[in-house]
C-alpha cells in the first residue's frame, strides 16, 4: 500500500493559470437517477447575457496576468441559448482555454461547429439516455476533427475525452463502448457513480444522524439507507449500489484510463516516488480523502455555482463572494475542511499532506520559498507555516 503525500497537475505551464469551473445553471434535459435535485432540473432560468458578460469582464480584469482556463458545466451548459456567443466572447477576451462538459444530446452538427471555437470537450456518456447511439456518433465526429487539428499543428491544440458513467446492470454495454472508443483512439475514463441520496421523510429530530435513501437506477426513491456525517454522504459505504461482480470489474479497470493528468508523490516503504496517472485512480482506490491537507484551491482554481456564488473550488470549502457583487481571491493555500474530494476538476489541484512535504510539488516549493523570504524580511515568526 502507498501513502500519498502530495499531488499536482501534470503540466508545469498550469502553475501560472487558474482553472475556473463555471456552472451555467441547473437547466438540463436529462434526469439521471444519480444526479441530485440540487444540481439539475428542467425549469431553472438561464443566466442573462448581462450577467454572463459582466462575469467575463470581472474575470478578465480582476485576474489580469493569470492564464484563464474555463470549464463550462451545468446542468447541461449547451442548452443556454447564448452558449456559443459566450464561448466566442471569452476567446475575444483572451481566455487561454475554454472547455465544456456536455451530455452529448445536441445534434452532431452543433458539436462539429463548436469544435472551431472551443479548446476542449468532455462528453459524459449516460446509459440511462434512450438515444445514446447518437452521442457516440457525435463523439467520433468530433474526435476526428481534434485528431486532424492536432496532427496539423504538431501538438495537442485541442482535447476531447469521454467520461463513461458506469451504470449498474449496464456493464456489457460499457464494454462494447470501450471497444469502439479504443478502435478510434478516443481518450476515455470510467467513472464510478457516486449515487444520489434523498432524505427520508418525515425527518425525526430525535435521530442521532439523518438517514437518507440511496437512489438506485430508474427508481426514485430507492431502497438502501445510509447516513450523513456532517461532511456529506460517506461514499465508502455505497457498496450496495453495485453488485459484487460489478465491484470487482471496476476494481480491475477503473485505474486503466488511457491518458494521464496528474503527478502523485507517495511513500512506499521508506522511499518517496512520483508517478504520472489519472485522477480517477484516486476515486477507484478511495485515496481521495484530504481533510486537513494544505490545498491550493482558490489560488489555482475557482468555482462559480449555478446560484452565482464563487467558491475556491467545486467542493465549496470557502465562499469568496458572488458574480453579482464581486469576490476576492485568497493569497494563501488553505487547510482542507472536507473529508472527501470527489470532483475530478478539484483532484488535480495541488495538495500536500503537511508543510513538511512542501518540497514535493512545484507550487508548494514556491510557496515555501516566498514564506521563508517574508519571515526573514519581517524578522518575525508571525507567519508560521501551517502543518
Image (cartoon, rainbow, N blue to C red):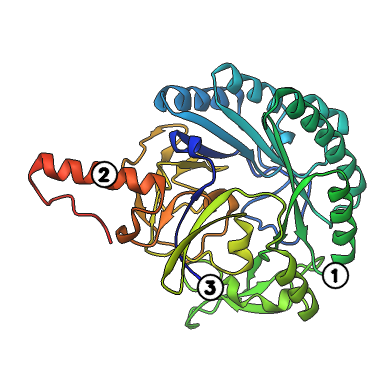
Secondary structure at badge 2 equals helix
**Mark found first going from the N terminus, 1 or 3:** 1
Q: Position of residue 206 (x, y in %)?
A: 48, 83
Residues tagged 1 and 2 counted as in contact (Cβ below 8 A): no
Give the spatial CA distance, label 3 vs label 2: 40 Å
Circle 1 sits on which residue? 169
- Which corner quadrant of the image does residue 111 belong to? top right
Give the spatial CA distance, label 1 vs label 2: 52 Å
Q: Residues within 10 Å of mark 2 (few under 14, many from 20)?
A: few
Vertical relation: 103 (above or below) 217:
above
Viewer-side residue, 63 vs 307: 63
Viewer-side residue, 331 vs 22: 331
**Mark found first going from the N terminus, 1 or 2:** 1
The mark found on residue 228 in the picture is 3
Q: Is residue 171 left or right of residue 372?
A: right
Secondary structure at badge 3 equals loop
The mark found on residue 369 in the picture is 2
Residue located 77% across and 45% down the image: 103
Q: Residues within 10 Å of mark 3 (few under 14, many from 20)?
A: some
State which mark lies toward you, 3 or 2: 2
Location of the C terminus by quadrant is bottom left
Residue located 35% across and 36% down the image: 328
**Mark found first going from the N terminus, 3 or 2:** 3
Vertical relation: 248 (above or below) 194:
below
Vertical relation: 249 (above or below) 255:
below
Q: Is residue 269 left or right of residue 234?
A: left
- Can residue 170 be seen here? The reply is no
Q: Residues within 10 Å of mark 1 (few under 14, many from 20)?
A: few
Residue located 39% across and 45% down the image: 363
Q: Farthest residue to the front: give it.
A: 271
- Can residue 216 be seen here? The reply is yes
Amino acid at each position: 500500500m502507498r501513502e500519498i503525500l502530495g499531488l499536482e497537475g501534470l503540466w508545469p505551464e498550469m502553475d501560472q493559470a487558474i482553472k475556473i469551473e463555471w456552472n451555467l445553471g441547473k437547466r438540463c434535459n436529462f434526469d439521471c437517477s444519480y444526479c441530485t435535485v440540487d444540481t439539475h432540473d428542467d425549469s431553472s432560468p438561464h443566466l442573462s447575457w448581462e450577467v454572463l458578460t459582466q462575469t467575463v469582464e470581472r474575470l478578465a480584469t480582476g485576474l489580469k496576468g493569470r492564464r484563464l482556463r474555463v470549464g463550462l458545466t451545468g446542468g447541461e451548459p449547451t442548452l443556454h441559448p447564448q452558449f456559443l456567443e459566450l464561448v466566442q466572447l471569452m476567446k475575444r477576451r483572451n481566455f487561454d482555454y475554454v472547455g465544456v462538459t456536455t451530455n452529448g444530446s445536441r445534434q452532431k452538427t452543433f458539436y462539429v461547429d463548436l469544435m472551431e471555437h472551443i479548446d476542449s470537450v468532455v462528453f459524459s456518456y449516460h446509459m440511462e439516455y434512450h438515444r445514446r447511439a447518437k452521442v457516440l456518433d457525435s463523439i467520433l465526429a468530433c474526435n476526428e476533427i481534434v485528431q486532424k487539428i492536432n496532427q496539423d499543428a504538431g501538438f495537442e491544440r485541442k482535447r476531447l475525452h469521454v467520461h463513461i458513467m458506469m451504470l449498474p446492470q449496464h456493464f456489457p454495454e460499457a464494454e462494447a463502448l470501450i471497444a469502439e472508443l479504443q478502435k478510434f483512439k478516443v481518450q476515455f475514463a470510467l467513472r464510478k457513480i457516486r449515487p444520489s441520496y434523498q432524505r427520508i421523510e418525515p425527518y425525526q429530530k430525535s435521530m442521532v444522524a439523518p438517514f437518507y435513501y440511496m437512489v438506485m437506477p430508474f427508481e426514485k426513491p430507492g431502497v438502501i439507507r445510509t447516513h450523513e456525517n456532517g461532511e456529506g454522504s460517506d461514499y465508502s459505504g455505497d457498496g450496495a449500489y453495485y453488485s459484487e461482480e460489478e465491484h470487482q470489474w471496476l476494481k480491475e479497470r477503473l485505474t486503466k484510463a488511457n491518458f494521464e493528468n496528474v503527478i502523485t508523490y507517495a511513500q512506499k516503504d521508506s522511499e518517496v516516488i512520483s508517478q504520472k496517472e489519472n485522477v480517477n485512480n484516486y476515486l477507484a482506490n478511495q485515496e481521495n480523502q484530504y481533510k486537513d491537507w494544505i490545498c491550493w484551491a482558490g489560488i489555482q482554481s475557482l468555482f462559480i455555482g449555478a446560484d452565482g456564488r464563487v467558491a475556491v473550488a467545486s467542493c465549496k470549502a470557502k465562499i469568496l463572494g458572488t458574480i453579482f457583487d464581486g469576490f476576492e481571491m485568497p493569497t494563501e493555500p488553505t487547510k482542507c475542511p472536507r473529508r472527501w474530494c470527489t470532483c475530478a476538476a478539484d483532484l488535480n489541484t495541488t495538495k500536500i499532506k503537511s508543510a513538511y512535504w512542501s518540497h514535493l510539488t512545484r507550487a508548494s516549493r514556491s510557496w515555501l520559498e516566498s514564506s521563508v523570504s517574508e519571515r526573514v524580511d519581517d524578522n518575525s515568526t508571525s507567519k508560521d507555516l501551517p502543518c
